[in-house]
Image: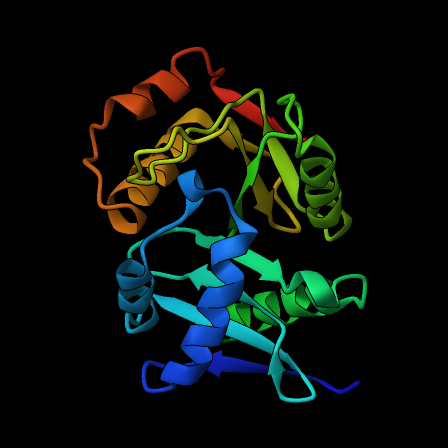
Amino acid sequence: MKLSIETLFCKKSDVFDDFHSIYSVSFPLSEQKSKEELFDMLCSPSYTFFIPKIDGKTAGFCIIFHSTQTSFYLLEYMAVDASLRNLAIGSKLFSYAIEQVTNKYGIKPFLVEIDSPQQESQESEIRKRRERFYKKFGCRKIDPFDYILAIKSEETAPPMKLLVYHIKMQNVSKSQLEEWLEDIYMLVYGCQKDDERIAKMLLDAPQILKLV
């Protein structure tokens, strides 16, 4: 099987539909954006959609937010078609996306939103595997810190964690984290800078948070 990785553009509506068919079954409804929101993201200069293909068939996706207004990048969504897992597609996709974004826009920390693996649920093992996957590449968890997803949904978002990928960073200051959260809430999810959830997340945070 031959793997290739492409960048998805607005005009490729057929590939967008293939991507969305995988997206719609890869995440809980509480974490999903609408099809219209995703299409707007696709057409925005602040996003890149990386699409891996196996013998020409869409095999997954990786969506990176890379606004020039922020001091970070955000890996917002990544998934591989369930029928094509365990073929190292995710590993190659992650490495490729990081390399492409860094080469084009410069070095910044990559933030990654994941469901908390500590939360008891039917998907506990999947969440633990997902955390192990990212940690394998050097992503580390902000600790102690619980992340509240700002998605606009009627569903209740599960407890989340925020990972950081950066070779040299060993910790993050509370003020830096506050800046990241404000930008994520405003620029990624369309919320207010003074959203009460940001204050709630930072209420008990120390001045310096470790990356573990």
Quadrant placement of the N terminus? bottom right
Residue 162 versus residue 44 in the image, above or below: above
Q: Is residue 68 visible?
A: no
> Which scheme is used to colour this image of the protein?
rainbow
What percent of the width, then of the height, locates residue 131? 69, 40
Q: Position of residue 18 (x, y in %)?
A: 49, 75
Q: Is residue 71 above or below residue 154?
A: below
- Tell me if 137 is positioned left or right of 12 in this view: right
* Residue sitting at x 49%, y 29%: 158
Give the number of callouts.
Answer: 0
Q: Is residue 206 left or right of residue 40?
A: right
- Find residue 19 and report its horizontal and vertical position in percent: 49, 70
Q: Quadrant of the C terminus?
A: top right
Q: Position of residue 152 (x, y in %)?
A: 28, 40
**Residue 126: which quarter of the image?**
top right
| Left or right: 154 in relation to 118 | left
Closer-to-camera residue (49/170) = 49
Relative vertical location of residue 4 with respect to residue 204 in this rendering, above or below: below
